[in-house]
DNA sequence: GCTCATAAGATACGGCGCGTTTCTTACTCT
DNA sequence: AGAGTAAGAAACGCGCCGTATCTTATGAGC
């Protein structure tokens, strides 16, 4: 019933534990890049990782969980907010670094995936905080408070809504636009909206 | 091979044309209300409308198209922007009316559907303009210009980005929050962001 | 080195929903 | 009345999900 001595190019070695897990998450990443999220299938991932579906389901309960794990592995970590002494420069640098975290994936893969995240109530929360462990909201607030201390903006304008404002606008631009907002868009958001507001009396 | 004289409660009458179409779209609306968008199935709609799937597919090419047709039928039309003489009141009234266009559907039905719209590049455009024939952006700009004429805000702050700002923020709040933003949220957006910005020198 | 619990890997299955096909049968138009 | 048109019923193929079953390689412990 079994199979005779393995033929030609077939693998016999059997990966386990972390090695196997890394291979799977890499496969997820590759499938994501090649087909986008909506066309990423569990069978496809299993095939690419040269393993089988049960192996996937022994580790992750469903497709979104698997993809989240892959994103968590491959997305650059949260970084300290810049501190250049100039609020606009700080914000621009920080926001751009956020936007380009997934640049090695094709645009519509990320877009499709993030749109799908919006469906799950629990995942929406993650989305709101910017998909990072330590919320970028805190970073934004820190930068703004420093600017207020320097007298560059009006401290009274700092509140939860204004703090997350740049994030909200960029998220919206990404969702509705379908592509990562350009540097120019980031600049407009800062110069036409965020900074004038923060400086208002 | 046929069936003998129709039994008991069974229907024999066969609807056609507009009558049938109305019945179908009503069924879509009801399914939307009962199960939400993601769990709305073509079979379900057909069953509820007491018809069959081919009838649906003869009229609409796929599920989203069918739902769009149903929304188009039942959604209240675009209305003239209010003009109370007070910018805040105008904006609040206008935005609230936009937000509550689909109030007779459960929240997550609308949310799920709109999230799906985001996938189609062509439909994203519709989304950006607020899902109405005549863009609410124009209405917002009109209200702001009137306020500037009255001296309530700084005319120099009116630009495409600030005009669509309230819309962008509410859309984002809806997408990420999963529910139609409360009146309080609308108030915060106006009082903490939009109005201070428009009044800034 | 041998034994054995563990988990990988292959395969197949049931389920569901989509969109389509085939065929019968009621209605409408002239 | 007769012919064309479209409704309705049923079933199909497809793709994918998530699970169950069984074999077999692998590493741990003796």
Image (cartoon, coloured by chain):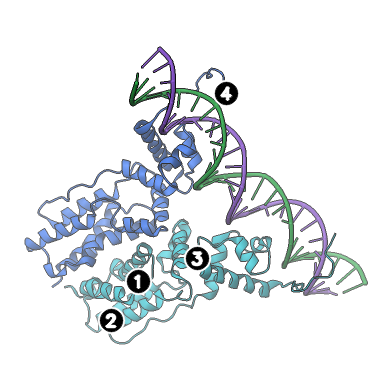
Chain colours: A blue, B cyan, C purple, D green
Is there one chain holding both mark 3 and mark 1?
yes
**Chain to which the residue tagged by mark 1 belongs:** B
Q: Is residue A199 above or below residue A47?
A: below
Which residue is drawn at the image coordinates 13% and 70% (left, top)?
A156
Relative horizontal placement of residue A185, taking residue A86 as reference (left or right)? right
The residue depicted at 63 percent of the width and 68 percent of the height is: B48
Residue B36 has which mark? 3
Q: Which residue is mark 1?
A: B181
Q: Are marks 2 and 4 on the same chain?
A: no
Viewer-side label of 2, 4 = 4
Tell me the residue at 44%/47% (across/down): A63
Question: Marks 3 and 2, Cα distance to the nearest angstrom?
Answer: 36 Å
- Residue A104 in percent (x, y) is at 34, 41
Parent chain of label 4: A
The answer to whether tags 1 and 2 share a subunit is yes
Give coordinates of residue A100: x percent, y percent. Answer: 29, 47
* Same chain? Circles 3 and 2: yes
Few, some or many C-alpha atoms within 10 Å of disc 4 (few <14, some 14-19, many ≥20)? few
Q: Are marks 1 and 2 in contact (CB under 8 Å)?
A: no
Q: CA distance from mark 3 to mark 1?
A: 18 Å
Q: Nearer the viewer, mark 3 or mark 2?
A: 3
Q: Determine crowd level at label 3: few under 14, some 14-19, many 20+ residues with C-alpha closer than 10 A.
A: many
Image coordinates of residue B35 in percent, x first then y, are 52, 66
The answer to whether tags 1 and 4 share a subunit is no
The 10 Å Cα crowd at callout 1, few under 14, some 14 to 19, many 20 or more, is some
Q: Circle 2 sits in a helix, a strand or a loop, which is it? A: helix
3 vs 1, front mark: 3
Q: Secondary structure at mark 4?
A: loop
Question: Could you give the CA–CA distance between mark 4 and mark 3, rounded to whole angstroms?
Answer: 49 Å
Q: Chain of mark 3?
A: B
Q: Which residue is mark 4?
A: A2
């Amino acid at each position: 019933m079994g199979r005779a001595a393995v033929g030609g190019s077939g693998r016999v070695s059997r990966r386990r534990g972390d090695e196997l897990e890394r291979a799977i998450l890499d496969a997820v990443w590759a499938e994501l890049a090649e087909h986008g999220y909506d066309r990423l299938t569990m069978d496809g991932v299993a095939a690419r990782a040269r393993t089988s579906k049960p192996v996937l389901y022994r580790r992750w309960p469903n497709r979104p969980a698997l993809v989240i794990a892959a994103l968590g592995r491959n997305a650059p970590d949260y970084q300290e907010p810049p501190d250049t002494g100039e609020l606009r420069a700080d914000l621009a640098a920080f926001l751009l670094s956020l936007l380009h975290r997934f640049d090695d994936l094709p645009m519509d893969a990320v877009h499709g995936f993030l749109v799908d995240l919006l469906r799950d109530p629990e995942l929406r929360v993650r989305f709101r905080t910017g998909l990072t462990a330590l919320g970028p909201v805190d970073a934004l607030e820190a930068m703004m408070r420093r600017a207020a201390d320097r007298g560059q903006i009006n401290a009274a304008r700092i509140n939860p809504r204004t703090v997350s404002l740049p994030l909200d606008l960029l998220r919206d631009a990404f969702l509705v636009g379908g592509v990562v907002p350009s540097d120019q868009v980031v600049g407009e958001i800062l110069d036409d909206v965020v900074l004038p507001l923060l400086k208002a009396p």
